[in-house]
Amino acid sequence: MRHFAFLSLLIGVSASQHSLKLPVPTRQLEWKDVNFLSTSDIHGWLLGHQHATWPEPNYSGDYGSLASFATHMRRIAHDKGVDLLLVDAGDHHDGSGLVSSSSDAAGKAEDIFSMLPYDVITIGNHELYHYEDALEEYKNKGRWNGRYVTSNVNITIRSEDGSFQSVPLGEQYLKFDTEQGRKVTAFGIIFNFQAHAKGISVQKPSKLAKEPWFLEAIKDKPDYFVLAGHMPARGETAEFRPIFDAIREVHPKVPIYIFGGHTHVRDCVQYDDRSIGVVPGRYLETVAFTSSSLPQDNDDGPLDVARRYIDGNPVSYKWHTNTSDEDFDLPPIGRNISLALLRLASDLNISTPLGIAPHDYFLERHQYGHPRSVLTVFSDQVLPRTIIDKERNETRVIIGNAGSLRFDLFQGRFDRNDELTVSPFTSSFLYVELPAGLARNITEQMNKSGASKLLPSEPTTKLEEEDRVRRIYNEWMSEQWEDYLVQGGDDHLYDQVESQKIFQNDESDIPKKPRTMGFVTKDTCPGKGDDIKHYPVPHVGNQPDFVQTPFPDVNNDEIIDVVSMDFALDDFLAAVNILDPTIDLKEGHMKPYAEGLEINVVFGMYAKEMWQDGL
Ligand SMILES: *[C@@H]1O[C@H](CO)[C@@H](O)[C@H](O)[C@H]1NC(C)=O
Ligand SMILES: *[C@@H]1O[C@H](CO)[C@@H](O)[C@H](O)[C@H]1NC(C)=O
Ligand SMILES: *[C@@H]1O[C@H](CO)[C@@H](O)[C@H](O)[C@H]1NC(C)=O
Ligand SMILES: *[C@@H]1O[C@H](CO)[C@@H](O)[C@H](O)[C@H]1NC(C)=O
Ligand SMILES: *[C@@H]1O[C@H](CO)[C@@H](O)[C@H](O)[C@H]1NC(C)=O
Ligand SMILES: *[C@@H]1O[C@H](CO)[C@@H](O)[C@H](O)[C@H]1NC(C)=O
Ligand SMILES: *[C@@H]1O[C@H](CO)[C@@H](O)[C@H](O)[C@H]1NC(C)=O
Ligand SMILES: *[C@@H]1O[C@H](CO)[C@@H](O)[C@H](O)[C@H]1NC(C)=O
Ligand SMILES: [Zn+2]
Ligand SMILES: [Zn+2]
């Protein structure tokens, strides 16, 4: 039984990959004295992207193929006599079936993640929302062979004598020699993240930069510094600067290599000409290659640096390592990891098809209201059909929040893994009885205050932090699309029917000019960053923060059930009280609705009911 599911998954994945032609890189990597592969924000996407809708196939490499790639790259570095370090900037939890389908899934996925030895790895905010998750990382940090570094994150644990103690969650800093004998000092730093669980402490980077232990750790001069940070290299939440400046006070010329994350974008910044900071995007879509010359003894000139955003798929991996299909798969680690992943997916039962989605539904490619918008399907079909309370009649409106949806939903097989990539969150439903006339105005009121609420203060809840990342990522995607249109890019090509035709037929139908859909990165480093030239993914900005199910046909004075997600309860209560302050609605007035149902199961319920055709 288990073997059957296991096998069909294997076949499903490879069949879809073989029928598709991926673009081939054209520019060799610029190997230099020191080279890095960096990843971030993998969020459990270790199985890679498995759907056939573009640009998904471009990111079809699983973590096993990344491990093979890294192994070949290490061999090439060895042959060339140069350094190659692997760096990851955190956020392994939340986002796919492998990490979100059960409470112990993420820990098992981490065991597989750590089969590939990283040189420097740090923690993300998603490992810090729940104390148990952070504790699991702390207890098992040994799996990273002493390379899990969290310079400004402590966890409070009960020590042997029963007292409580705040200790660094991972290593406080790293000092090691590379294979080529270079001395490295490394830190792992997260931005001033406040929405963490109790029992965790996060120190602001600007305070870390003044800590006596930190100043002591940077005293000796290494050949170079490495900063792995769960934060971007510029803009909101970028807080590398105080650390960078503190190092520069002591070592004005020692190279500093910075690897960021958190905002899910691709980016590159140089704080000065003896450093480079690279952010590699999200979900195993990108592996960043960064390289730099090392200064000779008295050389004070600028470093020669480069960075490349490699699309995470085997075609790119093989091309850059000059390996054939057979050679590429030779290192046992790649096969071991791929098999371990399939076994875990099978144990977690996340690959059984629940239905066949009849179309692609996109999170940001269409305006809310469009029939192919995930948000429209969510509010008009999924919520009304699945969130039903047997004790209540169906005269009700449900208000859902857009932030609880994270990814596109693709045509074809739809399984638990897909369901959790669309919405990995555990948010339940609550209701209160209100007059229909008032209820009609709540979603709009929530929308009005919802987005702006984020501006004045630092996010202090998971919802707010999620919304911030979503906003920054969407601004980046939207900018790519708008630039493209301004430059005369062809809008009509991206019509849904057209794009299906373009990408499903054979190569002769692929238009000559814009070649393939994907990221179009504009960063501030010299030269071209994207390994393969793409045209951007269509993107519609200004999506609502909150949406509602079709309003029941009732008079304004009728009393109806108004249902909110607990995730957005604060916004809901505030909106009702703004509309009618005499109600003075409080959390205690809300009662469970459709008790036991959470947002992370509704798409599966819907698929089981509505998408059985073709199964
Ligand atoms: C973590 O604990 C160490 C002592 O064990 C202390 O030096 C450091 O300041 C603490 N850091 C944080 C972020 O609390
Ligand atoms: C790639 O490998 C082939 C044979 O394995 C070799 O002939 C060729 O020179 C290599 N090319 C590069 C660019 O390394
Ligand atoms: C791969 O798995 C085999 C069998 O479990 C094991 O003997 C071997 O050490 C593993 N190799 C690597 C590189 O993970
Ligand atoms: C696996 O999931 C499918 C779909 O939800 C379900 O029908 C099946 O009973 C599950 N199998 C096991 C062994 O839990
Ligand atoms: C639904 O229930 C409410 C009271 O709980 C009642 O006022 C209303 O008339 C009912 N509506 C329908 C259509 O049965
Ligand atoms: C709802 O909004 C409409 C249109 O803005 C307004 O006329 C009406 O008074 C509002 N009703 C309540 C109860 O807030
Ligand atoms: C993925 O591959 C397809 C097919 O060649 C191509 O059209 C598309 O641009 C590629 N996208 C990315 C992001 O690599
Ligand atoms: C807010 O929600 C309303 C009702 O769903 C919608 O019409 C409106 O476009 C939304 N506005 C914003 C700014 O999100
Ligand atoms: Zn992330
Ligand atoms: Zn993050």
Image (cartoon, helix red, strand yellow):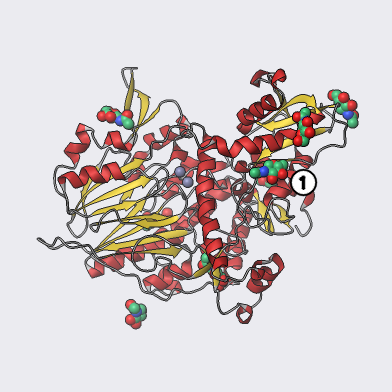
Residue 432 position within the rendered picture, expressed as x and y whole percent measured from the top left: 74, 24
Of residues 338 and 287, the one drawn nearer to the viewer in this rendering = 287
| Numbered disc 1: secondary structure | helix
User: In percent of the image, x 65 and y 71: which residue is there?
Assistant: 493
Residue 171 position within the rendered picture, expressed as x and y whole percent measured from the top left: 29, 38
- 378 horizontally vs 299: left or right: right
User: In percent of the image, x 68 and y 56: which residue is there?
Assistant: 361
**Three-letter code for the amino acid on which mark 1 is drawn:** Gln
Where residue 194 sits, quadrant-wise, is top left
User: In percent of the image, x 19 and y 37: which residue is there?
Assistant: 215
Q: Is residue 445 above or below residue 39?
A: above
- 557 horizontally vs 102: left or right: right
Residue 230 position within the rendered picture, expressed as x and y whole percent measured from the top left: 39, 44
Where residue 509 sits, quadrant-wise, is bottom right
Where residue 140 sits, quadrant-wise, is top left
* Quarter placement of the C terminus: bottom right
Q: Is any part of residue 414 visible from this angle?
A: yes
Q: Spot the residue most to the left.
A: 298
Query: Quarter for ligand 2?
Result: bottom left
Q: Is residue 310 above or below residue 279?
A: below
Q: Is residue 52 above or below residue 152?
A: below
- Residue on which disc 1 sits: 381
Q: Is any part of residue 335 visible from this angle?
A: no
Residue 36 position within the rendered picture, expressed as x and y whole percent measured from the top left: 32, 59
Of residues 2 and 587, the one drawn nearer to the viewer in this rendering = 587
- 493 horizontally vs 168: left or right: right
